[in-house]
Amino acid sequence: MTQSVKITSDVDSVRSEIRDNSIRVIDVRREGDYKQDHIPNSVNLPLATLLSDDSPENVLKLVNSMGIDDETPVVVYDDTFGALASRVAWTLEWIGHSNVTLLETTYGNWKSLGLENDSKIPDVSKKDHSLNLQSDILATSDYLESAKSREDVILIDNRERLNYLEQHIPGAISLPYRTLASDDKILRSKEDMKRLLGNRGVSGNSEIITYCGSVGTLSGLAYYALKSAELPNAKLYVRSFKEWKNLQKPTIKQEDANYWDLSAE
Amino acid sequence: MTISDLTHSSVDPVSPKINWARVDEADHFAETVKLYRQGKYDEDSFRRFRLQHGAYGTRMTSDYAMVRVKLPAGEIYPKQFEKLSKLSEQYSIGSAHFSTRENIQLHWVILEDVSEIFRSLAEVGLTSREACGNSVRNVMCSPLSGVCCDEKFDSTPYALATAKFFLRNPMAQSLPRKFKFNFTCCEKHGMVRMVDVGLIPEIRQVDGSEQKGFKIFLGGGLGNKSFVGHQLEDFTPEEDLLYTSIAVMRIFDRLGDRKNLARNRMRYLVNDMGWEKFQNLVLKERAIVRATQSVVTRLKVDTTPSKITRPLKISDETGGSAPDGYARWLKTNTVKQKQSDYRSVFITLEAGDITSNQLSVLADLIREFSSEGKARTGFVQNVALRYVHEDDLIPLYSKLLQSGLAKSGALTMTTPVGCSGTTSCNLALTNSHRLAKEIQRKFLELKLDDDDDLADSSIKISGCPNSCGQHGIATIGFFGGGGRNGKDMYANYQMSLGGRFDGETMLGQTCLRVPAKRVIPVILKIIELFKENKKSDDTLKSWIHRIVNNSEDSAVKSINDIKKILEPLIIPPNKDDDPDFYLDYGSDTSYHTKTGKGECAA
């Protein structure tokens, strides 16, 4: 029933697809970093630019300006262990772009491997992408509030363990984003990911909602981690804990222990 | 080509000789946790299983565990530091904790993630197997073994061989209680009389040739009730080391108390039976063990000397001027080795805590500065880089400064030991961990580490009477409890004076109870009294030693004299005048005692 979806693109195929000019590569780092050097032929979409207005209409405008239409295969990369790239990839998916993957490694690692990069800014002709909003991959606070009491819903907090101990959404389990990567890739192998999640009871057909601190980056990476483990029924609570707290919805903390003392300042 | 083919991993000149891990234990653990959560495994059996694999319970919750990673003989290699750094970020709280028994602990690990840690540890040859539970705990060795100027020979290979022999050995899986071995280098750097089996290397002349062996001490230990160990015989030749160890364990296994959890360490057996009787039993049992081996059982002692290669320096950093604080650090954190031109450098931590970033920095520093390519953990929640060339000390100090690891006082009274206390332990009554840090910060601020009179003294703090913080052998020791003023409670410590763990090992004598927020002024007052009354060549340690032995002749003659002087300092203030008094360190809510079930005895 579950079909294998491609979540990451390996370095080799990305390199050859760049040579064939058959993909659009998006660099989500800051503009200054991008201008210095980047993967050849990649376009720049700093995460901050996206976040300043991530309404479907504006995202569509950005996508069009990057020369992406419904059929364009897109690969996204960052230098932040895949979290920023994930947030951008998820947004593309959300407006209805189905062919988007993450580069399997970070730009820093790409460079340290001695792979090609330059500072040329490609000429991109505008394209016309349709809007086909995928609401089922988004969780709003209202949705989360009603969903989390359901038996078949798993809520995952992807912040660091210490943040979780201090305060989290009731019912959430803690799966820090650092657990998702392997030594050289932004995501573990499928088998490793399945085992990690399986041990934690994250498996089967449950609906899984991920959240993190503020804008859905760490939890965006977790969203793709779930998909890589063939758990397709995932949603991102994209406004995450920051919104939850601002709305003064209930939170809980670990009682009876001064655990913070063990984290040397 | 895949990315993994491209990633070249750095190759260390020295890598671990012994692989302590078994990766199949990770799968087994994961499966067992699942069965347990499904209710197919009863609580007690699961707890025993969990502890046997080195996962300890956490304060007031069954969701989390603490994973205690063993470092046999204290040895740790760069790759292992890097792995622990990563694991602390992934599965713990971004930091790790050095224990007093050469373990590194990861706290607040979700029970279901413990198996993932085992799997990763196996990649670098480490295990937490038998780090808890009724087994042979981590076999310790002095961090100076092999470099100590006073040692007869290096006992490290014997510690490693002993650890290897007993790990997963069926005879050590279900003892009446935990069982601990400490090897050391010499009397001074000891800890051999405060443990089930303590060993000091010794050499004797037999027919004109040298014979290696040990002075073996049995039946010591710290706890709710502490005892000093007894020396078995003048000299135990090295070939008898294993037979002696087996004999002692067999007796303990057979006669140790399996019913009364509070009295089942071997020291109680020794104490109840009387030393002479126990000693005779051991000697007889050893003769039986020796005579009845069906195959010759012996320790596989690998005495190949470590390769000492001074790491190449790409840039010439020598000759630079020393940064501020260097002289103080050199004096209080480094020890000259018996090998000329080399020093062992102790890294000051706060009550054993270290961040994941600092762990990975240590990996780099070993590669860059240690000519033996590995490090050693110590007895006081610390870590030592050994074989650092004299010419490399300034560059090393500069690097330590950059990563917050250059604090001075590592080998002085200003670096107290503090168990984990209420930060994570079920049994704790007070936050001993934080108190240790507060004392350290204050004392470094007062530059007390620079005071030679205080250097050989120690402060050790436990959060309850059970002595994980080893308070009984401290010059000034504390264990936590609750105090009460009317209806209001506050964290309160029983203070003892005059404990020591060297050749004249003795337990400290109870002085008085000191509220947590008065501990620092009380210690400072004791130092003041010492300064007023000391003889010219006294240290705080020697002065207190005379007092507890009733041989002091100045104005302050006895524990009782000290007590009387300190009493005005410990009177609880009115809560409205000083609300802070009623809060324990590290807590912003009013103090109350709350404990769960201990697990040491499970």
Image (spheres, rainbow, N blue to C red):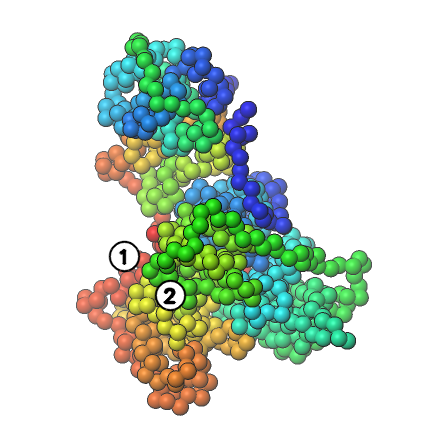
Quarter of the figure with the N terminus of chain B:
top right
Identified by mark 2, the residue type is: Arg
Q: Nearer the viewer, residue B134 or B206?
A: B206
Output the chain of dot 1: B
Report the residue marked by disc 2: B328
Who's the residue at 48% across and 60% down the image? B390
| Residue B297 percent across, percent down from the top left | 75, 59
Circle number at residue B588:
1
Who's the residue at 32% across and 58% down the image? B586
Q: Quadrant of residue B124?
A: top right
| Residue B378 percent across, percent down from the top left | 50, 61
Q: Quadrant of residue B152?
A: bottom right
Relative to residue B133, is residue B496 depicted above or below?
A: below
Who's the residue at 34% across and 43% down the image? A163
Identified by mark 1, the residue type is: Asp
Quarter of the figure with the C terminus of chain B:
bottom right
In screen coordinates, is B523 left or right of B239? left
- Mark 1 or mark 2: which comes first in sequence? 2
Q: Quadrant of residue B122?
A: top right
| Residue A125 percent across, percent down from the top left | 31, 10
Who's the residue at 55% across and 57% down the image? B74
Residue density around tag 1, few if under 14, some if 14–19, many if 20 or more, within 10 Å:
few
Callout 1: helix, strand or loop? loop
Q: Comparing marks 1 and 2, which lies closer to the viewer?
A: 2
